[in-house]
């Protein structure tokens, strides 16, 4: 890394450092959120599987809600873990300049679809559970 000589170079170096710090904090926050989503989805899935006998025996016409929640929560767990691995792989990358930092942000944004899929699957799984619970009150 070269020492900046002009005010413009110093300002660009400061901007790159601030963006690098912001990206680091954002990636840490994203990683923690994905961990929480995977934990809650896996826990709900484990509880559902544990009590499947009593759930399925309630109303056979609504079993598709339980199965839908199993599939959705399973997808949420897999998507969250895959996204977390993607973020973890990018955490080790330390760009040297502003252009490298922007490339790193681009790589992180490409994983957006997987993270969104995981979140939507989680919401659908929980919604199926709520609908099943309300229908069987």
Image: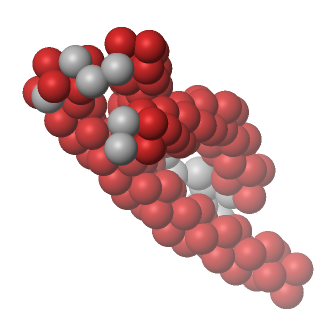
Between 94 and 58, the residue placed more toward the observer is 58
Q: Quadrant of the N terminus?
A: bottom right
Between 20 and 72, the residue placed more toward the observer is 72
Q: As drawn, is 114 to the left or to the right of 46? A: right
The single residue placed furthest to the right in the displayed view is 8
Q: In percent of the image, x 85 and y 87: which residue is there?
A: 7
Work out whether 88 lies above or below 8. above
Residue 93 visible, this angle: yes
Q: In percent of the image, x 36 and y 44: which residue is there?
A: 137
- From the top left corner, tell me how far across and down residue 111 is, in percent: 61, 34
Work out whether 126 lies above or below 23. above
Q: As drawn, is 111 to the left or to the right of 50? A: right
| Residue 59 in which image quadrant | top left
Q: In percent of the image, x 55 and y 63: which residue is there?
A: 26
Q: As drawn, is 11 to the left or to the right of 82? A: right
| Residue 57 in which image quadrant | top left
- From the top left corner, tell me how far across and down residue 16 is, in percent: 70, 68
Between 61 and 78, the residue placed more toward the observer is 61
Between 28 and 9, the residue placed more toward the observer is 28
| Residue 117 in which image quadrant | top right
- From the top left corner, tell me how far across and down residue 68 is, in percent: 46, 20
Residue 38 visible, this angle: no
Q: In percent of the image, x 26 and y 18: which residue is there?
A: 56
Work out whether 36 lies above or below 128. below
Q: How many marks?
A: 0
- From the top left corner, tell me how far across and down residue 17 is, in percent: 62, 73
Work out whether 25 lies above or below 83. below
């Amino acid at each position: 890394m070269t020492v900046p000589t002009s005010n413009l170079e110093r300002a660009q170096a400061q901007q790159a450092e601030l963006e690098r710090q912001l990206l680091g904090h954002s990636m840490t926050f994203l990683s923690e959120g994905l961990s929480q989503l995977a934990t809650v989805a896996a826990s709900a899935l484990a509880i559902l599987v544990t009590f499947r006998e009593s759930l399925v025996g309630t109303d056979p016409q609504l079993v598709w809600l339980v199965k839908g929640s199993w599939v959705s929560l399973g997808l949420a767990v897999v998507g969250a873990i895959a996204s977390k691995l993607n973020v973890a792989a990018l955490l080790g990358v330390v760009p040297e300049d502003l252009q490298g930092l922007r490339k790193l942000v681009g790589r992180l944004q490409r994983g957006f679809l997987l993270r969104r899929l995981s979140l939507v699957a989680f919401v659908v799984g929980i919604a199926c559970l709520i609908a099943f619970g309300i229908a069987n009150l």
